[in-house]
Each structure stands twice: as structure tokens, then as C-alpha cells.
């Protein structure tokens, strides 16, 4: 779970630095700091909270997305700024867009 959060935060930051830069330019410093911290060391991830969300949604990726959006909102990021969390690195997206090794 922590590793998924790390990857999600790194991906969010990559989007913010690239294609989504205009949309995320006003992301509050506290929200950026959270993303940066968790992308380097996901130890601060509240796994219990994510598991609680997952029990309700029955979807681990969605649970991480909801938790991350909630944490970003606590740090002043509005809904418009956290929509990028929906562009997560779900396994399906990776497997359908990655080249298949030819062995």
C-alpha cells in the first residue's frame, strides 16, 4: 500500500511538472510538500485509513486516490487541483500502454 502511495505521488508530481503544469500551478506549497515527501518515503501513509476506504469502495486503487485527495484537501488543495489524482498509475493503464516484451 505504501509503495502504491509513493508511485501515485511521484506520478502526480510528474504530471504537475509536465502536461498538467498549468492546471496545477496553484497547488498549495503544503500539498506539494506532502506529495514530495510521500514520493520519497511513503512511511507517513495512513494505511489503516486507506484500508477503511477500501472496505467501503472494494477497490484498492480508488481507496488510495480518495485518501490522497483527502490529504491534499487538508493542505488547501481544492477539488479542481486534486482531480489529477484520478490519473493514477493503475495496473490496467500500465499494462495496456506498456510495450509487451517479446521473449
Image (cartoon, grey):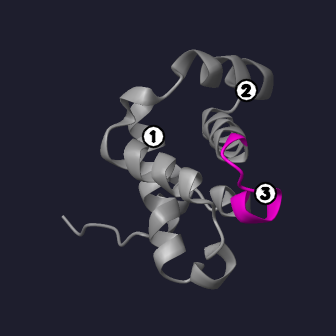
Q: Nearer the viewer, mark 3 or mark 2?
A: 3
Q: Residue at x 52, y 61 (%)?
A: 12
Considering only order in the chain, which callout, 1 or 2, is on the residue closer to the N terminus? 1
Q: Quadrant of residue 28?
A: bottom right
Q: Any magenta on residue 81?
A: yes
Q: Residue at x 55, y 61 (%)?
A: 93
Q: How many marks?
A: 3
* Number of other residues with Cα within 10 Å of mark 1, as a class: few under 14, some 14 to 19, many 20 or more: some
Q: Nearer the viewer, mark 2 or mark 1?
A: 1
Tell me whether the residue at label 1 lies in contact with that at label 3, contact meaning CB atoms closer than 8 angstroms: no
Nearer the observer, 46 or 86: 46
Q: CA distance from mark 1 to mark 3?
A: 23 Å
In the rendered structure, the answer to whether residue 12 lies left or right of residue 52 reads left
Nearer the observer, 66 or 25: 25
Considering only order in the chain, which callout, 2 or 3, is on the residue closer to the N terminus? 2
Q: Which residue is mark 1?
A: 4
Considering only order in the chain, which callout, 3 or 1, is on the residue closer to the N terminus? 1
Residue 1 percent location from the top left of the image: 46, 29
Residue 94 percent location from the top left of the image: 47, 61
Q: What secondary structure is found at the residue carrying circle 3?
A: loop
In the rendered structure, the answer to whether residue 73 lies left or right of residue 25 reads right
Which image quadrant: the C terminus?
A: bottom left
Q: Any magenta on residue 31?
A: no
Vertical relation: 43 (above or below) 87: above
Q: Which residue is mark 3?
A: 78
Q: CA distance from mark 3 to mark 2?
A: 25 Å
Please report the bounds of the magenta region as a residue range.
74-82
Disc on res. 58? 2
Amino acid at each position: 500500500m505504501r509503495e502504491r502511495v509513493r508511485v501515485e505521488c511521484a506520478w502526480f508530481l510528474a504530471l504537475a511538472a509536465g502536461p498538467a503544469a498549468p492546471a496545477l500551478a496553484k497547488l498549495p506549497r503544503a500539498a506539494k510538500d506532502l506529495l514530495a515527501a510521500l514520493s520519497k518515503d511513503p512511511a507517513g501513509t495512513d494505511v489503516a485509513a486507506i484500508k477503511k476506504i477500501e472496505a467501503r469502495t472494494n477497490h484498492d486503487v480508488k481507496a488510495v486516490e480518495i485518501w490522497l485527495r483527502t490529504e491534499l484537501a487538508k493542505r488547501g488543495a481544492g477539488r479542481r487541483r486534486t482531480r489529477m489524482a484520478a490519473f493514477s498509475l493503475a495496473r490496467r493503464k500500465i499494462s495496456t500502454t506498456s510495450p509487451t516484451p517479446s521473449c
